Image: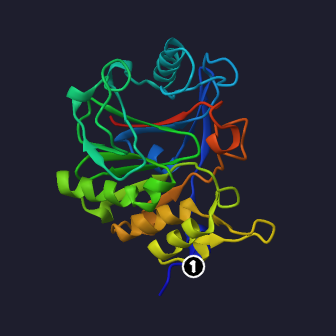
Amino acid sequence: MPNNAAELLKRVRSDSHYRESQGVGIIVSERLLSEPGVTHGFTTRRGGVSAPPFDSLNLGTSRDEPMENILANYRLLCEAYGLDYDELALVRHEHGSTVLKLGSEHCGRGISKEPLDFSDGLVTDDTGVTLVTCHADCSAFFIYDRVTRSIGLAHAGWKGMYKRIGQRLAERLTAEYGADPKDMVAVVGPCICENCFEVEKEIAEDFAREFDCPDILKEKPERPGKGYVSLHAAALIQLMDAGLELDNISVMRHCTMEEKELFYSYRRDGKDTGSMAAFLRLR
């Protein structure tokens, strides 16, 4: 039987909560907050030193603003939420489905040291490293396995979502640490929503076929030749295909394009936008 996007989004737990510490705003999941073994968050644009149009907590190192501002923002984030700046490891995304295994020897890579190899997902069972990914309309996958005490974090643009980066992340946790998908807790981060994510109709049809989900594609009469895709539905389907149970998955139901006060959006603002960051670490 084909998947049903509307039914999945209705059944999944909406799990988005705004927090602020020392002026730095983040989105958190109550589900992950209830797990004593991990620290996590998805940043907003609030609380940094970046000037317009990157105001104010730009964490994207590829943006056209002074690196000292970006690094200062990372330090502010760390001070606000009890992270060690020297333990951050930042993904070097390529909009694909490659997942890297990291340890404490990778601390500083992409921020104070040379970049990591290209990838979109990171896994670890090392308490000495904080996984970090950057986002500007792209979603994030947070996965925690209580039994093996392992974690995975991924950047998921539409290309990576189509290539099932979330599923590959779960599979890598199983391959590296013996994690059972039924023990995994997963949270899907904010992204551009199904009412705003416009693509060529052929791409939308590819999504419908890949995820066996006809209603993942919506059309608007006023936009002939275009389609609208639910990235959150694609995320749920691939996590379930990896073996996770829907009851163990939740979604941060924010639209990065619509909520300009909270989020940067490449689709809305083009190159004159900053980046949010997701972070995940073992305690």
Examine the rendered structure and indicate whether residue 238 appears above or below residue 38. Answer: below
Check the image and tell me how it is coloured: rainbow
The spot of residue 222 in percent (x, y) is 81, 67
- Secondary structure under tag 1 reads helix
The spot of residue 114 in percent (x, y) is 30, 23
Task: Please state which amino acid type lies under the numbered disc 1.
Answer: Pro
Examine the rendered structure and indicate whether residue 233 appears above or below residue 264. Answer: below
Camera-side residue of 206 and 46 = 206
One can see residue 61 in this view: yes
Viewed as shown, does residue 256 lie left or right of 240? right
Examine the rendered structure and indicate whether residue 195 appears above or below residue 11. Answer: above
Residue that appears at 75% across and 69% down = 220
The spot of residue 144 in percent (x, y) is 35, 50
Camera-side residue of 220 and 175 = 220
Residue that appears at 53% across and 47% down = 138
The spot of residue 130 in percent (x, y) is 34, 32
Q: In which quarter of the image is the C terminus?
A: top left
Residue that appears at 51% across and 29% down = 60
Look at mark 1 in the image and give the residue it sits on: 214
**Quadrant assignment, res 162:** bottom left
Viewed as shown, does residue 61 lie left or right of 270? left
**Quadrant assignment, res 91:** top left
Residue that extends furthest to the right in the rendered view of this protein? 222
